[in-house]
Amino acid sequence: MRRNLFLGACLALALGTLGCQDQDTDPTAPSAGIQSHQTLESLSLKGRLVKLPAPARVTDQHLADLVERVIVPTACDGATELVTLLNTQISNWATQEPGIFNTLIGLAAHVVPQAEAIFLLTDDTPQFFGYNGEYTKILEKVHQKTKGFWDIPSDDIQLIGMHGSMLTDEARVAATYQAAFTVGTPPQPISPAQAALFASIVADAVEQSQILDGGDFALFSFNAFAVSDPSGVIPDKIVMGDGILASYEALGFGDVAPEAVYAHEFAHHIQFENGYQTEPIPGSTPPITQAERTRYLELMSDATAAYYLTHKRGATMNKHRVAEFLQAFFEIGDCGFTSPGHHGTPAQRMRAAEFGFSVADQAQKQGHILSSEAFHELFVAEFPDLVAP
């Protein structure tokens, strides 16, 4: 029989701060020695990944920001249907199981599935998408179709599923802690013993929860992102989380979301391959802030995805249906105009999509697919108007 959450002073010892005394803890009571912000500080993480190889790039890392917004509410919520759905789930969990909530957020468990997908998972093993694999066939199909539509080298891009259910597998969780996280100041690698302890606590907490459904809880996989590592240490990937797909399904976008989210992430790989990540930004005066850079690339991805989704040789989706989905997709709650992760305002993002629609509409008449470079040139020319007041 497993012990109830082995927490308090013992966890503090694992983080290198206090002595340890074995104890059992009520899984629904606030844990004595663990608070989310304190432990994230000890992990040198604060909800974000660490130890990424220097040339590697990961897009769309907004998950931690959404969680922080629930833990420490801000005046700018960006409360759309999608964000409200997730925030309600998180708030209900925090209220009903505060001990488990503090434990898992404190150990950054909500980031562990993302870290595993980036650092450890490859398509050498069978992949599935959706809590019960319900999106596997459609995503495998769109993965191949999108590669055939665009002209960049893409055979090496792997399609990877992100699953919160991995949090009950102690071996996988421990391996992820060692691969992606550090502890202490200055940061130190997590030892095998520390990783095993953290993994045991996480697995116990998830299994004891009456809310988390064995890890199939949207928060733990509420993201999709592109990964590129020119050094080759990490394979190029598009990672699709179960939680983001299930949440869009709950809002009535199950017919659009898999292809649309994937198309946005594939557009980031076009940027990686063609070197758009560091190019001059039209209308911007150096030095370019990270917020400006991110907004430029995200609006480019929005436009590129919209072009593919509505092109008759692409996903051939109805423009109005795609626009309905994109309204929810774009209003992800991004109102941090100076944040390094700023994606642009909802209005700017919709303008970018409408630009992509219009270019695809012209292509219907001409019957051909623009090269990625040709589409990029059109976007660059249009960009100042997209962000104009």
Image (tube, rainbow, N blue to C red):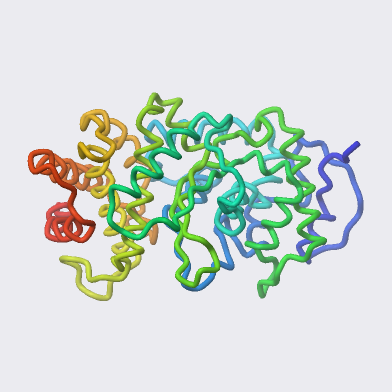
Residue 133 to residue 23: above or below: above
Counting labels gives: 0
Left or right of residue 185: residue 333: left
In what quadrant of the picture does the N terminus appear?
A: top right
Residue 75 at what x, y percent from top left?
A: 40, 45
Residue 252 to residue 360: above or below: above
Left or right of residue 249: residue 305: left
Of residues 225 and 344, the one nearer the viewer is 225
Q: Residue at x 63, y 36 (%)?
A: 94
Left or right of residue 75: residue 167: right
Residue 87 to residue 382: above or below: above
Q: Quadrant of residue 195 in the image? A: bottom right
Of residues 249 and 310, the one nearer the viewer is 310
Q: Quadrant of residue 306 in the image? A: top left
Residue 219 at what x, y percent from top left?
A: 55, 39
Q: Residue at x 63, y 62 (%)?
A: 180
Residue 303 at what x, y percent from top left?
A: 23, 48
Residue 73 at what x, y percent from top left?
A: 49, 44
Q: Residue at x 22, y 71 (%)?
A: 280
Residue 94 to residue 230: above or below: above
